[in-house]
Structures are given as C-alpha cells and as structure tokens.
Amino acid sequence: MPQQNPIPRVLIIGAGIAGMQAALDVANAGYEVVLVDRLPSIGGRMAQLSETFPTLDCSQCILTPRTVEVGHHDMIQLVTYAEVESISGDAGHFQVRIRRHAAYVDWDKCTGCGLCQEKCPGKAESDFQRGIGKRKAIYTLSPQAVPNKPVIDREACIYFQRGKCRVCERLCPTQAIDYEQQDSFIDVEVGAIILATGYDIYSMENMPEYGGGNVPDVIDALAFERLLSASGPTAGEIKRPSDGKVPKELVFIQCAGSREPEKHNAHCSKVCCMYTAKQSILYRHRVHDGQAYVFYIDIRAGGKRYDEFTQRAMEEGNTVYLRGKVSRVFRDGDKVTVWGADTLSGRQVQIDADLVVLAPALLPRPETRRLAEMLGVGIDDAGWLVPLNGNMNPVETNRPGIFLAGTGTGPMDIPESVSHASGAAAKVLKRFSTVDKSTPIR
Ligand SMILES: Cc1cc2nc3c(=O)[nH]c(=O)nc-3n(C[C@H](O)[C@H](O)[C@H](O)COP(=O)(O)OP(=O)(O)OC[C@H]3O[C@@H](n4cnc5c(N)ncnc54)[C@H](O)[C@@H]3O)c2cc1C
C-alpha cells in the first residue's frame, strides 16, 4: 500500500513565545498553521514581563512585532480563548476538535474600540496583573492584546449575576455584544502537532514559611514584573500593594519552593538567578535610594554574558547578596520581617523590609497533563512533557508527528524557548517537505 501524504498543516497548542516562534517558522515556509491558546490573546508569560535579561530590552517592544505578525499572517489561523477538546488519528492525519469558549462578544463585529471596557461597572481581580490592580468584567488582557477583542467574565458581570446592567451592549457602536453566545467547535485535520503549553509558578499559598500568600507585601516575581512594567497597574512605579508606599528596603528570596525536595519541589527553576538580578537592577533604576538584598543558595548564571549580568546587579545595582536560606517571613507592623542565615559569615540575619519578592519554582501547567494523556505523550512525575531523548531528540516525543517546544518541557529562558521552538518547527517542515505544495489541502 502506498503511504498517504501527510496533511501539510500543523496544530500548535500554546501561543507563548515558543508557540509563536514555531508558528512563524512553519507559516513562513508556506504551510498552514492552526495556533490555539486558552487565553483571549497571545504572547504567554512574556507579555507580563517588564524588561528581559541580559540586555534589558523592553519585553513588550520585542514581543509586539511577533504578536502582530502572527495575528496578520495569511497562513496562521489564530484560535484564542480556546482549548483542544479531542484528538484522534496518527502522524500525518490527526483529527482535532477545538472548543472555543463563549466570549459573549461577536469578534467579527467588534472593532476593538475599548468603549465597553471604559464604561463597564463590573470589576474583578486581574490574573494578568497577578492580583495587583483590577480589571473590568469585560476585558482584554493588556492594551497591546492580539487579537484586540474583549471577553466577558460571567462571574464579574453584573448582568450575568443580577440580570441588570447591559451597559456594554448599549454603548457598543457595532452591536457586537451577544449575551446568548455559546461555546463553538472547530474541526480540523492536521499532519503534525506541536505542544507549547509553557509553565506556571508555584503558588505562595504552598509556602507558609513565606507568609502563605497572606502577607500583602510579600509578592511573587511575576507580580513584581507587573509593578516594573510601564503598562502595569502602577505604570512602572514601584509601590507596595498594602499602602502604595515606595519600598526603600526590598528583599528577594530565590529558590522559593525550588530545590527543596522534602517540603516543596526538587528541581532548579533555572531562570530565577537571572531574573532576580534583573529585577534588582531595575528596582534601583526606579528607586535610586533603595536597598535590595538577595537571599540565594548559589548563583546559577550559565549563559552568554549571564555571569557578568549578576555581577552588574551587585556592583551597579548595589544589591547585597546573602548566601543562605530564609527560615521565616512575617508581617510586623507596617514592615515585613525576614529571618534568614548568612552561611558565609555564619550569622543570623534579620531584615525589616518594606517589600519581599519571592522567586517561586516554575511548574508545568496542570492542564498539560490532560493533553499528554489524551495524546499518549510522555510526562514525568512533576507533569513536565518528556522528549523522546533529552540529549539527542529534545523536541520529539514517543508519538511520531507530535513535537515539543518551550517551557512545557522544563524551565527555560526566552532565547532557549525560541531555539527549542525553531527545532520543533524544523522537524515539522521535514515531514511536510515530501508533500507537493500545489496539492489542495483537505
Ligand atoms: C518572573 C519571571 C521573569 C522572567 N524574566 C525573563 C527574562 O528577563 N528573560 C528571559 O529570557 N526569560 C525570562 N523568564 C522566562 C520566560 O518567561 C520564559 O522563558 C518564556 O516566557 C517561555 O515561553 P513559553 O512559550 O515556553 O511559555 P508561556 O509563556 O507560558 O506560554 C505558554 C502558552 O500556552 C498557553 N497554554 C497553556 N496550556 C494550554 C492549553 N492546554 N491549551 C491552549 N493553550 C495553552 C498559555 O495560555 C500560554 O499563552 C522569566 C520568568 C519569570 C517567572
């Protein structure tokens, strides 16, 4: 029997920097891409970052050209606010059903003018801003969102909860609000799949020693990225959540929930030494008379110019690095007291800080397990996607035709995620290279 040609179309699940890079590589080679993300807009975690190590490039400035290119590419079908419902078939011929969640806004009619968000009286905590600052019940993730189309959060919407309001409907100039909208389904056949589902971070609730998420001025590093960001809730000014004061003494705690197999997670999260150094430099750029301290186990800055960057944090940023673990963090009046040990000098240390920033363990996203089980792709005990062979086949899986890209496989920084994604795209293109491009796609 002659082998059937693969369908020259790829499904990419996850539109962070890794998924977007893979999508652009495949699409620019002339093949169709279906790019799915569970959030309303693309960009993943990178969209939440302020500036990136080691160059201190503004994250949005280097990300936006990519999100815009993806959003306008003729060969990329972008399906956001959506999840894969089912996948069957085999390499070359996977049948995929995608569930698109009801946004209660007709995106074909919506022009993205933003009037609905401006006037909406419903409010909710913003996940994107990591709980610092509110968003409206009808919202986009950020002002630079691609696609720039809002969704309604039913739980926060006054009309959905109390049957009254409909302000957004009244104001919408294109009659795009549709409270009756239902989830819809898209069926597509693809020849290959790339999993680019990214990472989550360990919740502060799991770490009672650092306040368990109950001390307002103990925040995680992603929340600090939002404070640093010009498009964040404080427009880039460092103000602590409890009372808006500018923190003059700031403590960073690395390896929060990482490298602690007895209590938390065993693995090293790889990017924290670098982003903590970055955040301490940026803190000094914003608060010139501020003093930052970093508690660390050891500095892991393996990468081109990475070690020099951490040196820069110590010298230019004047950051005091303390080698040792923190045993307890607690609220004391309007201060946050940090008890730790400096193992180099053998001293106990107490710092009465204004703000504490944790660098929590990077973890796989919980939904990735369901996808891996559906596809029969390997995952390890923690839930990271497992490549066929970490040394020699880092982007292939045990299932032919299914590839991996980015931090769904383990902690990586942006350059590594991008090169991993390009590797996955190259494998897909190799599979498609046998297909005559003039053959109509089913
Ligand atoms: C505080 C902090 C600061 C950092 N600073 C830097 C820095 O300065 N420089 C640097 O190089 N790196 C930095 N990093 C690391 C950087 O964030 C990652 O390398 C990069 O974002 C990884 O991109 P990704 O595409 O693999 O994953 P993600 O950005 O997590 O994207 C994954 C995407 O997949 C989607 N998704 C997940 N599951 C599903 C599903 N089941 N169905 C559909 N969609 C799904 C998600 O919604 C998301 O959009 C930092 C990390 C942290 C925590």
Image (tube, rainbow, N blue to C red):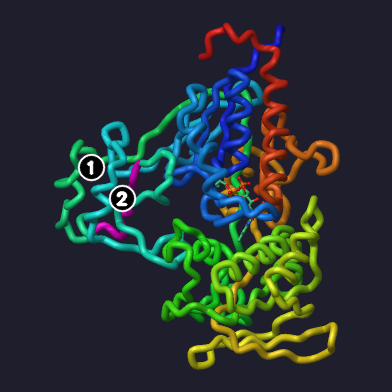
Front residue of this view, candidates 314 and 330: 314
Q: Is residue 341 above or below residue 194?
A: below
Q: Overall secondary structure of the magenta stretch?
A: loop
- In the image, which residues are magenta? 149-157
- Give the vertical position of 74 relative to 18 (above or below): above
Q: Observer-nearest residue: 247 or 267? A: 247
Which structural element holds mark 2? strand
The residue drawn where x is 53% and y is 79% is 247
What amino acid type should be assigned to the residue bearing mark 2?
A: Ile
Specify whether residue 238 is painted magenta. no
- Tell me how many marks there are: 2
User: What's the amino acid at mark 1?
Assistant: Ile
Nearest the camera: 198 or 226? Answer: 226
Q: Which residue lies under the disc numbered 1? A: 177
- Report the residue marked by disc 2: 152
Spatial distance from mark 1 to mark 2, Cα to Cα? 9 Å
Q: Where is residue 107 shown, x and y percent of the image?
A: 32, 36
**Position of residue 329 measured from the top left corner of the image (x, y, whole percent):** 61, 84
- Is 156 magenta? The answer is yes
